[in-house]
C-alpha cells in the first residue's frame, strides 16, 4: 500500500447481542385471586354470622340462657294444725332443700375430672349423707340432667355452712388459679320442716309428714291438699353459682296452705293420754285407747292411744303404733254394748226398767250353755238390775222379747245396732278407719243369736263405742263425730267445717230412761262400775269385759276391758270411753282397770270445761226384787 494511503481499518471487536428489556407481568390476575379468596372467607364468616344471628338465633339464645339462668321451686309453707283453743299442734319451720346442677360438675365446666368426688367429700359430713351416694347424684347417667336434690328439709344452719364454703372457695379461686370452686353448682330451695311442739301428744290424730313433704297418716294425710298449698317458682341469672342481681328475675309466689283447727282440747288430750299410758304400762297390756266427746255437738275433745309415737322422730317409732288404734282396731265390745240391747227393749216396749227378770245360774240356748261372769244362785233382778249387774243371761232373756220368734228378735236388734252406727263408718273419713264387723241376722250362727245381745259376735272401734253413749246422752239423737272445726286460708278468713249429720235412734224418753238405768251401774253398791263414781256428780256408765280375738292368731286369747259413760247423767255434756286390750298384770275386769281411768279423765274434763254439778238427786232405780 502506498504513501498517503489510508491506514487500514482495524477490525472492530464483536459486539455483544442486544438484551431485551425486562417486562413486569400484569398484577390483575393475582389481585383477582386474592380478592376471590378474601371474598370467600368473608362469605363464610357472613354465612356463619347469619346462621348464628338469624337462622339458629333462638337455639343459641336458649342454650346461652340455659347455662345462665336457673329456675327454682318456691315451696309453699304447709298450714299449721291447732287445737280448738288455737294452741299449736303442728307447725312448719324454715328449712332448705339442698340441690345441685350436675352439668356444672362436668370436667369441661370445672376443668377437673374429679369435681363430683371433691364436692361430695365436702358435703357429706355437713349433710350427714354417704359420700358415694352424693357422687352418684352429682354424676348421673343422664348427662343432660340439670336438677338433683341432695338432701331435703335441712336447717338454715346447714345451708349457711355450705354457703360459707362456697364463698371461701370462690375467694381462693380468684387469687389461686389452681383452685376450683367445686361447690359452684350447689344451691338451696327454700322449704319447710314439720315440727310437732308437743311431741307424741295426739300423734295418732295428727299423723306425720313423709320425706316427700306429703301427709303420711292422720289429719296430715286426710287434709294434705288443704295443708300443702301451691308451690311457686323463681328464675334468675347466675354466674359461678352466684345470682347476678342486675340481670333481673321473675317470680311466681307460693300460696301457703290453710291452717286447720281441730275439735280436740290439748289439755284434755294430755289428761286422757297420760291416764291410758299409765294403765297400759301398769297392766302390761298390748294397747289402750280413750275417747272424749262433746255429747251435744259430736265434737271429739280427745282421742288418745297407748303406745304412741313421736312424729318428730319416726326413726325410733314402732310401725304398729303409728296409726290411730282408736279408729283402726276392730274388737268385740262386750258388755258396754248391752246398752244398745236395752235401748231396743225399751223403745219396742218389750219391758220397762222395773220389769222382773229371773236370772238362773246357767241358761241353755241353741248349742251353748250361757253363764254370767260369776257363779251365782238364781237372781231376781229388775231390767235395771240386769244392766247394773251386767248379766249376760238377763240380757239374752230380755232381748228374746223383741220378736215372736228368735229370728224376728234378731232382726229387730240388728236394726237398732245399725241405727247406733255399728257396722258403718263413723263419718270422720279418717285414713285407715275400720267399720267393724256386723253380719246380717240371716248369717248369724246359732250361738251369735245369743252372744250379739251382750256384745260378742260382732266388732266395733273405740269411736263407734263412744258414739253410742253420746247418742243416749244427746236424747237419742246420733250426731256424726267430728275432728275438724274449720280452716283458715291465706286470706285469713275462717271457714267452719260442714255441719255433721244427725239422726234419731231412740226417743228422748227412752234415752232419759237409759241414762237413769246407767246411773245404777255406778251409784248402786251392786253395780259393776262403782270405781267410776265422781263425788258431786251423777254419773252414767257401763263396764265391759269381753273375750278378745288375738289379731296374730285369730283365736280367743285374753280380754278387752272397757268402760263407757257420760256426765252429768241428768244433763249430759261429756262422754268418755276407755278400752284396754289384753291386760296381763292385775285385774282384767273393765270396772276395775278402766273405771278409774274414766273417773280421772272425766273429772279433768268437767273442770277444764267448767261444767258444774246439776245438784239433782240420783234416780236410784231398784236393782232387784223379792219374789
Image: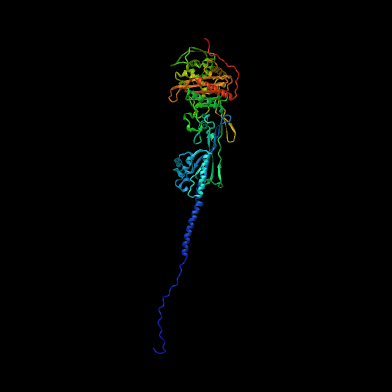
Position in image of residue 82 (x %, y %): 56, 31
Q: Quadrant of residue 141?
A: top left
Residue farthest top in this picture: 627
Q: Is residue 437 visible?
A: no
- Quadrant the N terminus occupies: bottom left
Residue farthest left in this picture: 1
Seen from the viewer's position, the closer of residues 169 and 355 is 169
In the image, taking residue 471 as reference, residue 6 lies left or right, namely: left
Residue 28 sits above or below residue 543 on the image: below
Q: Is residue 259 visible?
A: yes
Q: How many marks?
A: 0
User: What residue is rendered at 45% in x and 18% in y?
Assistant: 447
Position in image of residue 321 (x %, y %): 48, 29
Position in image of residue 36 (x %, y %): 47, 60
User: What residue is rendered at 43% in x and 73% in y?
Assistant: 19
Colour mapping used in the image: rainbow
Residue 286 sits above or below residue 98 on the image: above
User: What residue is rendered at 50% in x and 54% in y?
Assistant: 49
Position in image of residue 359 (x %, y %): 49, 13
Residue 61 sits above or below residue 564 on the image: below
Seen from the viewer's position, the closer of residues 37 and 273 is 273
Seen from the viewer's position, the closer of residues 466 and 154 is 154
Seen from the viewer's position, the closer of residues 495 and 69 is 69
Amino acid at each position: 500500500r502506498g504513501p498517503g494511503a489510508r491506514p487500514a481499518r482495524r477490525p472492530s471487536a464483536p459486539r455483544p447481542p442486544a438484551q431485551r428489556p425486562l417486562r413486569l407481568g400484569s398484577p390483575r390476575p393475582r389481585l383477582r385471586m386474592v380478592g376471590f379468596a378474601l371474598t370467600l372467607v368473608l362469605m363464610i364468616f357472613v354465612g356463619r354470622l347469619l346462621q348464628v344471628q338469624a337462622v339458629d338465633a333462638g337455639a343459641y339464645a336458649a342454650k346461652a340462657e340455659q347455662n345462665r339462668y336457673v329456675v327454682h321451686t318456691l315451696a309453699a309453707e304447709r298450714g299449721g294444725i291447732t287445737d280448738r283453743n288455737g294452741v299449736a299442734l303442728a307447725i312448719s319451720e324454715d328449712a332448705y332443700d339442698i340441690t345441685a346442677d350436675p352439668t356444672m360438675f362436668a370436667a369441661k365446666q370445672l376443668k377437673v375430672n374429679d369435681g363430683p368426688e371433691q364436692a361430695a367429700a365436702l358435703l357429706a359430713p355437713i349433710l350427714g349423707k354417704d359420700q358415694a351416694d352424693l357422687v352418684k347424684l352429682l354424676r348421673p347417667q343422664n348427662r343432660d340432667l340439670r336438677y338433683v336434690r341432695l338432701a331435703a328439709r335441712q336447717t338454715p344452719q346447714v345451708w349457711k355452712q355450705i354457703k360459707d364454703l362456697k364463698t371461701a372457695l370462690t375467694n381462693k379461686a380468684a387469687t389461686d388459679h389452681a383452685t376450683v370452686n367445686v361447690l359452684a353448682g350447689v344451691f338451696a330451695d327454700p322449704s319447710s320442716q314439720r315440727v310437732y311442739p308437743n311431741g307424741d301428744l295426739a300423734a295418732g290424730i295428727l299423723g306425720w309428714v313423709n320425706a316427700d313433704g306429703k301427709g303420711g297418716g292422720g289429719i296430715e294425710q286426710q287434709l294434705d291438699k288443704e295443708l300443702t298449698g301451691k308451690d311457686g317458682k323463681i328464675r334468675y341469672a347466675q354466674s359461678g353459682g352466684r345470682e347476678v342481681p342486675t340481670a333481673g328475675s321473675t317470680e311466681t309466689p307460693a300460696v301457703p296452705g290453710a291452717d286447720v283447727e281441730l275439735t280436740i282440747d290439748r289439755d284434755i288430750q294430755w289428761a286422757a293420754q297420760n291416764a291410758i299410758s299409765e294403765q297400759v304400762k301398769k297392766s302390761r297390756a298390748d294397747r289402750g285407747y280413750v275417747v272424749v266427746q262433746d255429747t251435744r255437738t259430736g265434737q271429739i275433745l280427745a282421742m288418745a292411744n297407748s303406745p304412741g309415737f313421736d312424729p318428730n322422730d319416726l326413726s325410733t317409732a314402732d310401725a304398729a303404733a303409728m296409726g290411730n288404734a282408736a279408729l283402726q282396731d276392730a274388737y268385740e265390745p262386750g258388755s258396754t254394748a248391752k246398752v244398745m240391747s236395752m235401748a231396743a227393749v225399751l223403745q219396742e216396749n218389750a219391758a220397762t226398767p222395773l220389769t222382773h227378770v229371773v236370772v238362773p245360774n246357767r241358761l241353755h240356748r241353741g248349742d251353748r250353755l250361757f253363764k254370767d261372769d260369776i257363779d251365782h244362785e238364781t237372781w231376781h233382778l229388775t231390767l235395771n238390775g240386769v244392766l247394773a249387774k251386767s248379766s249376760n243371761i238377763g240380757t239374752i232373756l230380755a232381748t228374746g222379747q223383741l220378736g215372736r220368734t228368735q229370728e224376728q228378735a234378731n232382726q229387730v236388734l240388728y236394726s237398732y245396732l245399725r241405727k247406733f252406727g255399728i257396722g258403718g263408718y263413723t263419718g270422720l273419713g279418717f285414713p285407715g278407719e275400720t267399720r267393724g264387723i256386723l253380719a246380717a241376722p240371716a248369717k248369724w250362727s246359732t250361738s251369735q243369736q245369743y252372744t250379739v245381745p251382750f256384745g260378742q259376735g260382732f266388732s266395733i272401734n273405740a269411736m263407734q263405742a263412744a258414739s253410742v253413749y253420746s247418742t243416749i246422752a244427746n236424747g237419742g239423737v246420733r250426731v256424726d263425730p267430728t275432728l275438724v272445726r274449720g280452716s283458715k286460708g291465706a286470706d285469713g278468713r275462717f271457714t267452719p267445717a260442714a255441719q255433721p249429720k244427725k239422726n234419731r235412734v231412740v226417743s228422748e224418753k227412752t234415752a232419759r230412761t237409759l241414762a237413769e238405768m246407767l246411773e245404777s251401774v255406778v251409784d248402786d253398791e251392786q253395780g259393776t262400775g262403782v270405781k267410776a263414781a265422781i263425788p258431786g256428780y251423777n254419773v252414767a256408765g257401763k263396764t265391759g269385759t269381753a273375750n278378745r280375738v288375738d289379731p296374730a292368731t285369730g283365736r280367743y286369747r285374753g280380754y278387752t276391758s272397757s268402760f263407757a259413760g257420760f256426765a252429768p247423767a241428768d244433763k249430759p255434756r261429756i262422754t268418755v270411753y276407755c278400752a284396754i286390750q289384753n291386760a296381763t298384770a292385775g285385774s282384767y275386769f273393765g270396772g276395775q282397770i278402766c273405771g278409774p281411768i274414766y273417773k280421772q279423765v272425766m273429772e279433768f274434763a268437767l273442770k277444764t270445761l267448767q261444767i258444774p254439778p246439776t245438784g239433782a238427786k240420783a234416780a236410784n232405780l231398784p236393782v232387784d226384787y223379792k219374789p
